[in-house]
Image: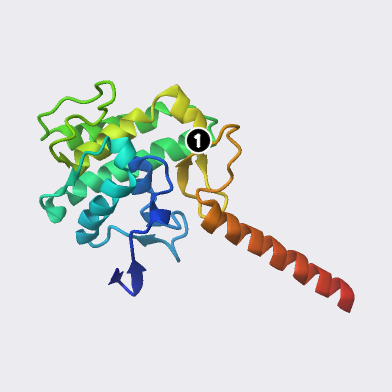
Amino acid sequence: MVRIGGMTVSWTPHRFQGGALALDAANTVVLRGDPERSFDRFANPAEIARFAEAAATFRADELGGRRLAVADPQRIAPVVLAIREATDRLYRNAVKAGGAVAAADMEPFLRACADGLASVDAAFGAPGRPFGDADTPIALEAALAVSALSLLSGGSLARLKLCRNCNWLFLDRSRNASRLWCDMAVCGNRQKASRHYRRRKAALEDEDA
């Protein structure tokens, strides 16, 4: 656990509720869209390495067991942040547009993903090995690009949602695609507690009227 600018940074399972590595990275900007309260977990580049270490465990199934490598957080930070921001913009707008991807968002997205793959000499996408050879680590920026590109499939686009509590992007893999929150144990319970508080407050105000 690390403190940055007075905020505590920890990489708990809740931080990996996006359903895909690229979405988990997009969600490292907390309260995106709220300038007064927003917080960037990658403000300190060292946190990029800590994110990768945690993601290798929490995203093991997606990665096919392949480890994530971060040689120099300071050096790769611009590429990682470019992929993160382009991914968030593309897919957040797609959710709002009912699954349609905007052409204007594709160019910066594809450029950022290409930059993430530029220094990697590897093959991706083989059946059962979407991230390549599981025996060797993969650069985080390359893994983010592969994860982000994989979400362009129609099946994934149709299941992308925004959490009604924290506004995170997440993949709804429930059978009937009825999830409202990225994490029922955290955001779902917060919403329920908030509704209970509002109902209780309204009842007390009625009693006093």
Find residue 102 and report its horizontal and vertical position in percent.
Answer: 43, 29
Q: Tell me the quadrant of the picture where the N terminus can be found.
A: bottom left
Find residue 207 and report its horizontal and vertical position in percent.
Answer: 88, 75
Is 200 placed above or below 55 here?
below
Find residue 4 and report its horizontal and vertical position in percent.
Answer: 29, 70
Which residue type carries mark 1? Arg
Is 66 placed above or below 205 here?
above
Tell me the quarter of the picture where residue 128 sits. Answer: top left
User: At 28% from the left edge and 57% from the top edge, which residue is drawn?
Assistant: 42
User: At 26% from the left edge and 44% from the top edge, which residue is drawn?
Assistant: 82
138 or 60: which is nearer to us? 60
User: What element does badge 1 sit on?
Assistant: loop
Q: Tell me the quadrant of the picture where the C terminus can be found.
A: bottom right
Which class describes the residues within 10 Å of circle 1: few (<14), some (14-19), or many (20+)? few
User: At 36% from the left edge and 54% from the top edge, which residue is drawn?
Assistant: 28
Q: Is residue 108 visible?
A: no
129 or 114: which is nearer to us? 129
Q: Is residue 76 visible?
A: yes
Reading the image, the residue beneath label 1 is: 173
| Residue at the limit of the structure toward the top, as seen here | 127
Is 135 positioned to the left or the right of 148 in the image? left
Find residue 121 and report its horizontal and vertical position in percent.
Answer: 9, 29
Is 109 positioned to the left or the right of 32 in the image? left
Is 206 positioned to the left or the right of 190 in the image? right
136 or 158: which is nearer to us? 136
